[in-house]
Amino acid sequence: MALIEIRDIHKNFGGHTVFNGMSLAVEEHQVVCLIGPSGCGKSTLLRCINGLEPIDGGEIRIHGERMTGPGVDVNALRRDVGIVFQSFNLFPHMTVLDNVTLAPIQVLKVPRAEAEARAMELLKRIGLEQKATSYPDRLSGGQQQRVAIVRALAMDPMIMLLDEITSALDPELVAEVLSMVRDLAREGMTMLLATHEMGFAREVASKVCFLYGGKVHEEGPPEQIFGAPREERTRSFLRQIVDAGRL
């Protein structure tokens, strides 16, 4: 059984169809990269998995448990599924340490001393333990994004959803964030990433899914998707990426 099972989901915004029978499976310890043109639904899919957006049909299951529809405990879902957005979303009035410990203390009821020890351990792993008492506006964009990832990891999730986490960063800061994701992949974290970083997707993904027309138009290992895509629409998309110098 796949860790995440997305079965024939449908989603509309007004008159616009985002998903038209989307299906996707993510196995435990897989790193699945979602690629495709702007507006194809990459970010929306992550938000649906985390319960931030409702779906209009179909179902999403995690470890076999239904995570969509009436009667679902969304808060319990979010304890198992961490999500990191492109805009960091750190609380500006709170220190780095307080940002990281807030959810474990408030949601998981972890004692403060234990939550702070875990937070410092995570911050040390990414070389930011000296920034624990700093506020977000004293950090670079890359540092803020790494703190946002650590904040999600502090909840000890089964799954990490990463939504275009480098798109708001200056190019020189992208590498430090991708290095952290690379480390998580090596450690076996199950991740689903929406990304425009094609070179990174090629390097780190277990599976790449090209979204188009409200569905997974093509999926496969990165060497197949980037080296010998079967579908013409996939080939056309990747030609544009190559022409833009992004692969």
Image (cartoon, rainbow, N blue to C red):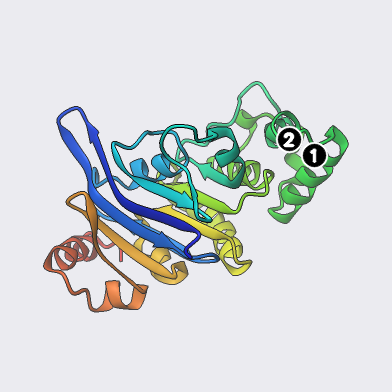
Q: Which residue is mark 1?
A: 115
Q: Which residue is mark 2?
A: 101
In the picture as drawn, the residue positioned furthest to the front comes out as: 71
For this rendering, which residue is in front, 245 or 187?
187
Q: Earlier in the sequence, mark 1 or mark 2?
A: 2
User: In the picture shown, does residue 144 fall above or below 199?
Assistant: above
Q: Where is the C terminus found, in terms of image quarters?
A: bottom left
Give the x, y percent position of residue 107: 69, 32
The quarter of the picture where residue 215 lies is bottom left
State yes or no: discs 1 and 2 in contact (Cβ < 8 Å).
yes
- Alpha-carbon neighbours of circle 2 within 10 Å: few (<14), some, or many (≥20)? many
Give the x, y percent position of residue 235: 17, 68
- The local secondary structure at tag 2 comes to helix
The quarter of the picture where residue 117 lies is top right
For this rendering, which residue is in front, 135 or 97?
97
Give the x, y percent position of residue 142: 55, 45
In the picture as drawn, the residue positioned furthest to the top comes out as: 93
Q: Is residue 206 visible?
A: yes
| Left/right of residue 195 with respect to residue 109 in the rendered view | left
Residue visible at 60% across and 54% down in the picture = 158
User: In the picture shown, does residue 156 fall above or below 242?
Assistant: above
- Alpha-carbon neighbours of circle 1 within 10 Å: few (<14), some, or many (≥20)? many
The quarter of the picture where residue 105 lies is top right
User: In the picture shown, does residue 132 fall above or below 247?
Assistant: above
- The local secondary structure at tag 1 comes to helix
Label annotation for residue 153: none
Disc 1 marks which amino acid?
Ala
| Left/right of residue 131 with respect to residue 220 in the rendered view | right
| Left/right of residue 25 with respect to residue 181 in the rendered view | left
